[in-house]
Amino acid sequence: MGRMAANDFLYYGEPMTRYHIALRKSQQWLLYFELLGAVVFLLGLGGVFFFGIFERDLWNILPTRNFWFGPYGQITRYAWLAFVALGFLVYRLTKTERPVKKLFYAKEWTSASATPSALSPDEALTWSMVKKIPFRRRKNIAHFFSLDARFALERAYTIAEKQDSEFLLPAHIFLALLSVPDIRGVFLRLGVSPSTLGAHVSDSIARSPIKRTPTLAPESQQVLFHAHELAIAARQEHVEPKELLVASVEWSNGLQDVLYDSAIDARKLTNVVAWIRVREELRRQYRLFRQAAQHRSKYGMDRAMTAVATPFLNALSQDLTIAAKFGQLNHCVAREKEINEMFRVIEGGRQNVLLVGPPGIGKMSIMEGVVEQMVKDAVPRRLQDKRLVQISNSALLAGTTVAGAEERLMRIVREIRRAGNVILFIHNIHDLMIAGADSGGKGLDVAGALSEALASKDIFVFATTTLEGFNRHIVNSELGSSFVRVDVREMDEDQAIQVIESRIGGIEYKHNVFFSYDAIATAVSFAVRFLHDQYLPESALELVTEAASVARSKRGEHTLVAVNDVAEVIASKTGIPATTVSADESDKLLQLERVMHERIVGQDEAVSLVANALRRARAEIRSTKRPIANFLFLGPTGVGKTELAKTIAEIYFGGEERMLRFDMSEFQDKSSLYRLIGSPGQQGTGLLTEAVRQHPFSLVLLDELEKADKDVINLFLQVFDDGRLTDSVGRVIDFTNTIVIATSNAGTAYVQQAFAQGRAPDEVQQSLIHGELAEYFRPEFLNRFDAIVLFRGLERNEIKQIARLMLKRIEKDLEHRGISLRIEESALDALAEIGFDPTFGARPMRRAIQDKVENALAGFVLSGTLERRDTIVLGAGAEIRIEKYIK
Amino acid sequence: MWLIVLQRTLLEFFWHILFFPIWWYSFGAFSAARVSFHVFLSGNYSLAPLLWFRNLFVPMYGLMDWQGRMISFFVRLINAIVRGVLLFGWAVCCLALFLTWFLVPIGVVFMLLRSFRV
């Protein structure tokens, strides 16, 4: 079998037959035998030689010429024979040192364009065509397979043979791979037991009724070539078992089905394999790095000794190249693009590079990557054999004025010029400007001195700053023009996963736990969804670190950190229930309407709308780019609009305090906009934005929205549509975990009139939206609500129920005092009579209960008439009487 | 089948023994040369006489005055010469290492034959 790829004819040149496998096995045994034989001969002959010397006591003449050339041939011959055995040992070891060829790639950073060329698709080949291909273009890909991979293939054949299969299928390769430790590790990380998986795969393979000699199935041939392609794409030296794993899954639907049942898809598998690759690469890089670091001076001297000591600079800075030499810096992952961009700037003739990006995004990590490349000398010529020195901003400014700091900076620059091998690095360069701006108002003195130094173009300066710092202090300054800006963008989720995979070893070691792949992937996706103040990868790193300690404190050491541990950390940080829904909770969710009706009387439509929204949110069947739900509650006062909002806050968000209530009547003029989102330039002054930033998982109640200014109302267009709002200092506040409820009394008179005329609710609502409401809200605003719910006026019967609910609260209070309350039906009728007012809804009922019940009770309590175990009876006419407890 | 495998393995075993001297003076010699060359290169990287030659007129430690320049020149010259000599010595050692590869089998066989004659 073979295929054409990029002008080469690729073939797998190790025949998969019983005979060849047996032969290869016996060759392996032969090698062991030969090595063992050589060692035995070496030791045996050497032993005999020394025994001869010992027996005849010839130690004295051992170093003399007489001994070796004299009459002791019967002893010395053993030494020479031992030499022959030693030679044979060297011969067999050297010959088998590299049993496989390495895949070749171009060198490190300059090779950005030299990515491996895509392999051309199969072409139909015939033997006669293959024969014409010259030998040098025929490539046996088997040579690039590591020994582990080859053994796995042979084991696969044995398995196929044992199972009486007609073909050697990808499933057999998969089964054989399950006994490779690395591959077992993959499945443990995926939270699946390799042996169970093996049993499932084994069951899925069709067996032939007669005993046959298996042959390599066409799809298995593809697996071999695909594994080779994967290894090239990942720039590996060899084709390893993990490539075979990915390829075998890709080429077998049966395997995909089995894995699908264990919740493993192709992306997951590829990412976990990438994880192993990251770890291998880390080990390899570390080895290379240590070798390179040996040649670095620990005193900051260049190899030609042209450098000058920089005592003043040293006192105010840290030499990152020396820190890297001693392994104090982290390995930089997935930032090749930015590092290469920096190197291109340097190659292009510029000296100064400014990394711009928000805090926590990995600017320092990029610098660590640059230092790493410097130590390995894999940098442009102009940066070779130089030191990267990070100036300490606080040391530069400590105990001095701006003028003093300026002088220090000038001295540093002078030293750097003289030394000639220093690259200056200033982390958070805007700190130097703020220092200048704050003291004395003279402005950017430190920056002035620095920009003068930069303009002379004889020193290299790398610096970092935040976006805000760049816009405020640098962009329009002289300094800004001296730097070439390199933007550092937030990583995507896959890159962040890679970074975490590269760092997770340290966290696992520290906490003595280990991470499943899902936990890491979830941490990254939760960090993106819920932690908006921080950036990837730092936000996700923090999450996994905390999840590790949560898992350890809950279940002890050597446990697997799972998705729910990460969710728990998120829940404790933000209050958002991110854990999977438990059985108890799902029962509760299914009966939400019943639970809500314990507090809300009537208003069935509103309750069911809200209940459905909550169920969708918790089951994660909703858009995560909008608030959980936006509702507009319309209706007369006292019919339960606010009460429903409170109920939601209690049931879904865990308490009424989770309701952020804004009386929109307080925001009637245009300037009140700034009270909601904060005054320009002042951080943390927006009432709405700050509240939601601190409690992203809450209910936002906008009471009497129609009373707010038009501009204020327009502000919510964006919230309803995108689930985000930008505050006055440019921070994006996330509303995607809130429920926004606006209430309004607009058009109440019309509604009551319409209901009195006996018109249908739907009809009333439609004419309300198109008529009365249009006065207050623009159609596009109304359009953005998930639902506009019309609360009906209450009926007498409902008022009675409300009275009962309110009295229940009093009953509870009395219970604490040991007094029971009995309510008679006639009392409820009387209360409904007094407390019912179609205009004011249930509000008069509260007053009625206050007057009739609470006032009387207060009198009883104060006069001491009430004793424990007494019963209060609320009877006809809502009159109260006491039934004394008879002992 | 097993008989054929055994036969083939035995043949390979004898071939390995026969191939031993041939390997020593062909592929083996090549890898010995490669190892010696790498040893030489690492010596060159550490001693770097050429680097010192290239910077002959560059003052050391930034001493830019004429006295400094003069002292630097001589120090660099001496350094370059001493390093050059050391590297030459190193190269000789490497060559000796490589030659040893060639001579050892001859010596061993010679001494072995001699020991049997005594």
Image (cartoon, helix red, strand yellow):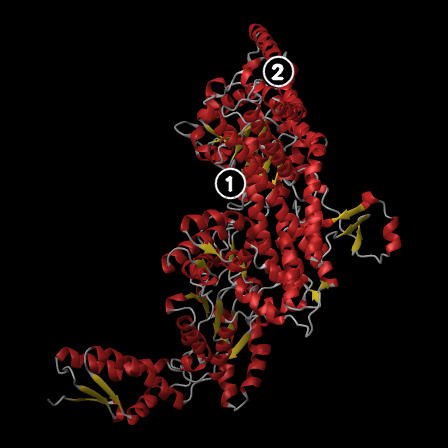
- Judged by depth in the image, the label closer to the viewer, 1 or 2, is 2
A607 over A525 or under it: above or below? below
**Residue A733 at x, y percent in the picture:** 51, 57
Q: Is residue A471 visible?
A: no
A513 over A316 or under it: above or below? below
Which residue corresponds to mark 2? B89
Tell me which chain the residue with mark 1 is part of. A
**Residue A282 at x, y percent in the picture:** 56, 43
Crowd tier of the residue under label 2, counting other residues whose Cα lies within 10 Å: few below 14, some 14–19, many 20 or above? few
**Residue B52 at x, y percent in the picture:** 62, 15
The span from disc 1 to disc 2 (Cα, nearest Å) is: 40 Å
Quick one: quadrant of the C terminus of chain A? Answer: bottom left
Which residue corresponds to mark 1? A330
As helix, strand or loop, the secondary structure at mark 1 comes to loop
As helix, strand or loop, the secondary structure at mark 2 comes to helix
Query: Marks 1 and 2: CB-CB under 8 Å?
Result: no
Let me know if marks 1 and 2 both belong to one chain: no
Q: Residue at x 46, y 26 (%)?
A: A54
Q: Relative to residue B3, is residue B42 drawn left or right?
A: left
Amino acid type of the residue tagged 2 in the rendering:
Gly
A94 or A511, which is in the foreground? Answer: A94
Crowd tier of the residue under label 1, counting other residues whose Cα lies within 10 Å: few below 14, some 14–19, many 20 or above? some
